[in-house]
Amino acid sequence: MNAPTRRLSQPEFIILVAFNFALVAFSIDSMLPALPEIAQALTPEAPNRAQLVLTSFVLGMGIGTLVTGPLSDTFGRKPVIFAGAILFVIGALMAGQAQSLETMLASRLVQGLGVAGPRIVTLAIVRDQYEGRTMASIMSYAMMIFTLVPAVAPLLGSYVIAGFGWRAVFYSFVLFAILAIGWLMLRQPETLPPKDRRPFVPQALVAATRECFSYRIFTLSTAVQALAFGMLFGCLSSTQQIFEVTYGRGDEFPFWFAIIALVSGTASILNARLVVRVGMQRMISAGFGLQIVFSLAVLFSGLTGGVPFALYLVWTTSLFFMAGLVIGNLNALAMEPTGHIAGLAASIIGATSTVLGVVIAAPIGLAFNGTPLPLASATAALSILSFTMVKRGLR
């Protein structure tokens, strides 16, 4: 473990880590209230395509995840985070000026590539300074703070839009990045000294990728995580339109989303308490099993007379709750045989599952027809497939 010459106090460090993680959530969730206006301005003939503003960002983040970890092993943690922040800011400024959907999507892709730096390398900074139970404690506190961001981001986004227009949301990303990354650059010492850095060798990345996918549990866990991300991203892409078009509650969306985020955020606490006793595979199976029940209930209700708003709220909460039960455990299972290449393995599983999740989610979002049924049908099918893969494959 590397020991920097100066270390921040734990409270300041925890908040700093949470803010850098939160840059991802803020860049996605605060966009949700802007989607109707983006659709009207850039793609009025096909408003569903505005959802691609979300998935293009996640796609860029997934691609960037593959290389930012290894690059930080070569050039140090802070230079890679700073370079990612510059790319993120450039993408945000480009998106704020975009006059076509194609330019907007390209800008969001650039933003996603940039945000991979803070997302991945901040975790490496935590590991450089702490390990074992202390690291777990710091990450738990950071994630508790992080949980608040998805809850308030749509509300903040709606205030920005009301006061300054939808393009101002992208400039708020710039301000958030300056605060989070600027704080890190000014206060956090470099945690990887030059003597501990390793050359960036593309062949090593290729070899590590081959080795990772030679392990059956890694391949299956990554595939199942991609299905989980597909459900989650599909829900994120469609949920604002469902509130607006299906239920006529677009103005209330930020408040309901805050409740959904806060309730579903308790899943990680529940998982932490139960996983030691019942095991990761049972928690994963339980998460997908419950989702099958909820999704089929929504599908049946929709086919027999319509989905009540209360049922839709409960179902959406269950989707995010499921993610809290399964994604961390799937990561842990995938990493079991790859401890000797943990950094590269984490990048590979993160990049692969995120990119595949976007590929799954994009057509789900574009299939929106004014009802929750396309999303419910896809989620039910993906949940059944995931549950089956876990039961038969992860044994």
Image: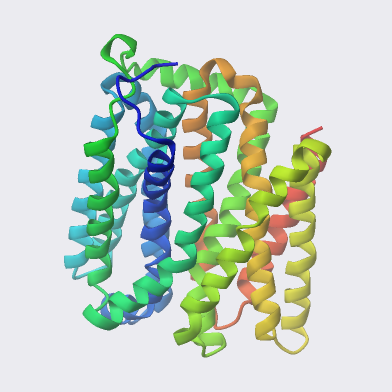
Q: Can residue 43 be seen by looking at this rendering?
A: no
Nearer the observer, 154 or 269: 269
Task: Tell me: 388 left or right of 178.
Answer: right
Task: Tell me: 13 left or right of 188.
Answer: right
Nearer the observer, 356 or 246: 246
Residue drawn at point x = 73 percent, y = 68 percent? 295
Q: Quadrant of the C terminus?
A: top right
Residue 365 is situated, as x and y percent measured from the top left of the image, at 51, 67
Name the residue at the top extreme.
195
Residue 111 is situated, as x and y percent measured from the top left of the image, at 29, 51
* Up-down relation of residue 359 to residue 196 (above or below): below
The image quadrant of residue 43 is bottom left
Residue drawn at point x = 69 percent, y = 43 percent? 272
The image quadrant of residue 282 is top right
Residue drawn at point x = 42 percent, y = 23 percent? 128
Q: Quadrant of the N terminus?
A: top left
